[in-house]
Amino acid sequence: MLNYKHLLAMSDDTGMLQFSQLSKPDPTSGYTLDDNARALMVALHMEEDAYLHSRRYLHFLANAQRRDGTWSNFLLDGIYYSRFDSEDSIGRAIIACAAASRSSWPDLAALGGRLIINKLTDLPAFTSPRAIAYSLVGLCNGNIPCPNAFLSQVVRRLADFLAGRYEFTSGRRWRWFENYLTYCNGILPQALLCVYEFNGNEHCLRIGKKSLDFLNDTLFRPGYLSIVGNAGWYQRGGRIPLFDQQPVDAASMVFANWQAYKVLGSREYLELARLGKRWYEGENIHGLILADKTSGGCYDALTQDGVNLNQGAEAVLSMLLSELLMEAANDSMPLFLDEGPVPQLDAGASC
């Protein structure tokens, strides 16, 4: 049974707080759209009081959405601030609302779908590759209350953008969408693999596989995952910075490889998803465990000197999402399965 103690400690009637000081929630850090979107995806699969927790986080997303469909990414002392808004946070909200739209609770399903509709026509104007990828994962997996032809058109336009970025930037030794690897890299190939699952686009399948294989070759070492550090990120032609490694990036690799296993049926991707999940358990460059079993939290980063002992929302939610995904796989995975239908969460998810 998963440990939700820290998630619940970080949450109140408003939503989930952003940061903690060690394991103590920091009410001065405010609330973000990103974190409450991830919290919603976790809550939808909780064993107890799933509806109550899911409603809380979904209502946070609803309250953060403005009349024009845009979202505020930051709430502090009852005031929504626009200076922290980002396309990426909106993309994560789209994924979470899509998950809600597939729930068995009619009110949550209706609200999740309605929040997506409020923003749907604006999504093709996005310019952030990750925001587009997040949105694609949500649109391809949600129960969106709009005509299928229109939804298919939006998905196609967003997928064409990502495919175009790949074709413009990639080379023989650099099979990627940008001239750098930064955060949550796995969402880009994951999105194109979701598009293939949605509409059978073989071009998206080829690019999704090539880019994920490149990412796996770059980040996995014998026996462990080594994430791109945030100290300058990994620039094309440069060296990969080793630190700080963020928990959200491990989850991104777990979900991308799981999606590849779902689509392609190769056990190699399943094993890489499992290995990525074990990054939290000590199979990383330091051999250090990031999960705090006492608090139920997750340390914020793997640093050059060890770990960042703070336990913010992003870290614990990324860990819980990875655990939920692998738990769903292990609970219903046929022995010696080589290919064929495999289990999944209620809707496409990501970090």
Image (cartoon, rainbow, N blue to C red):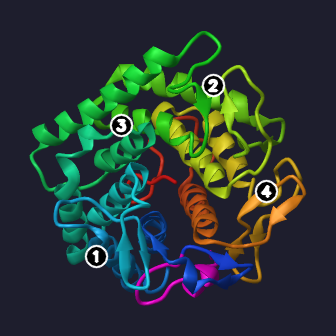
Residue at the location (69% across, 48% down)?
Answer: 276
Q: Which numbered dot is residue 127? A: 3
Q: Which portion, as a residue range, is magenta?
A: 1-17
Is residue 3 part of the magenta span, yes or no? yes
Determine whether label 3 and label 2 are within 8 Å by CB: no
Mark before the other along the chain sequence, 1 or 4: 1
Mark before the other along the chain sequence, 3 or 2: 3
Mark before the other along the chain sequence, 4 or 3: 3
Of the residues shown, which amino acid type is indicated by label 3? Answer: Thr
User: Relative to 243, does residue 338 appear above or below in the rendering?
Assistant: above
Mark before the other along the chain sequence, 2 or 1: 1
Is residue 264 part of the magenta span, yes or no? no
Residue at the location (38% across, 21% down)?
Answer: 164
Front residue of this view, candidates 266 and 287: 287
| Residue at mark 4 | 302
Of the residues shown, which amino acid type is indicated by label 1? Answer: Asn
| Residue at mark 1 | 63
Q: Which residue is farthest front?
A: 83
Residue at the location (39% across, 23% down)?
Answer: 163
